[in-house]
Image (cartoon, helix red, strand yellow):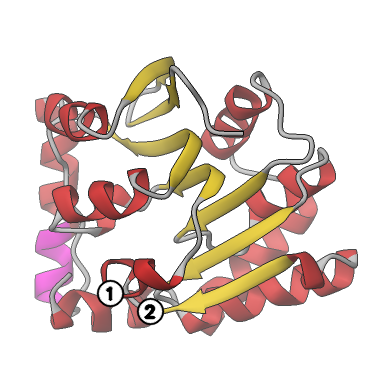
Amino acid sequence: MTCSQCRGIGLQFDRKTARRDLGRYRRRGPAGTTRKLIRMLAADGVAGRTFLDVGGGVGAIQHELIGAGASGGTHADASPAYLAASRAEAERRGHADRVRYVGGDFLEVHHQVQPADIVTLDRVVCCYPDMQGLIDASASRARRSLGLVYPRDGLWVRAIFDLVNLLQRLRRHPFRVFVHRTEDVERRVAAHGLFKRAHARGLLWQVVVFGRADPQA
């Protein structure tokens, strides 16, 4: 990730945004695509599993997986505000001791993170210009499943993201969003021995779970 994008993530996902998202999660539960990803992961069983939630925001996936019986895991995030919000919610729910919090660009810190049964990236691929590096760092840590929520790559989706980036430039805001080709993402994931297990498409986002033919553990 470029230094400009790292700075942009800190500005885009600040304390105000984290407070708003945490309040929304407490009132309504996970967002629709996040809920769908959790259901797909649960189909393979989560009891006793460990997780690595990359760019986990306020920790919706972590809290729900632990609630469903996961043993615990790691939240890696480039936003200090989101890490703080996630920890606060984990403390409120009484399971903060089951989550390790790692701050920084995942491409730089992934070597500090242990492999996990379940690795998730919920609307994170679209925040990285270096899709290949992000997928390599994430898929290499997935012992059993890799779950992604990322944009579809249709022309109208690209037009929306181009408009968002234009508005960001006009605001002189360094944060940008990216639409990576689905076949490029899937090819990179497949290079790590993971196959597509479940796939759901919405108007803007697609939810995909990849699994290993011979999962470890």
Residue 95, given in percent of the width and then of the height, sits at: 84, 65
Task: Kindly check if marks 1 and 2 are in contact, taking CB atoms under 8 A apart as contact.
Answer: yes
Residue 104's x, y, as percent?
38, 79
Residue 169 in the magenta stretch? The answer is yes
Quadrant the C terminus occupies: top right
Q: Report the side of 119 relative to 67 (left or right).
A: left
At x 18%, y 55%, the residue is 133
Nearer to me, 81 or 191: 191
Q: Hey, what amino acid is under mark 1? A: Glu
Q: Which of 93 and 136 is in front in this view?
A: 136
Residues shaded magenta: 165-171
The correct choice, above or below, for 4 with respect to 95 in the image is: below
Residue 126 versus residue 153 in the image, above or below: below
Residue 172 shows in the view: no
Disc number at residue 108?
Answer: 1
Q: What residue type is labelled 2?
A: Gly
**Disc sitting over residue 104 in the figure:** 2
Give percent across and percent down for residue 128: 21, 58
Residue at image coords 66%, 19%: 43
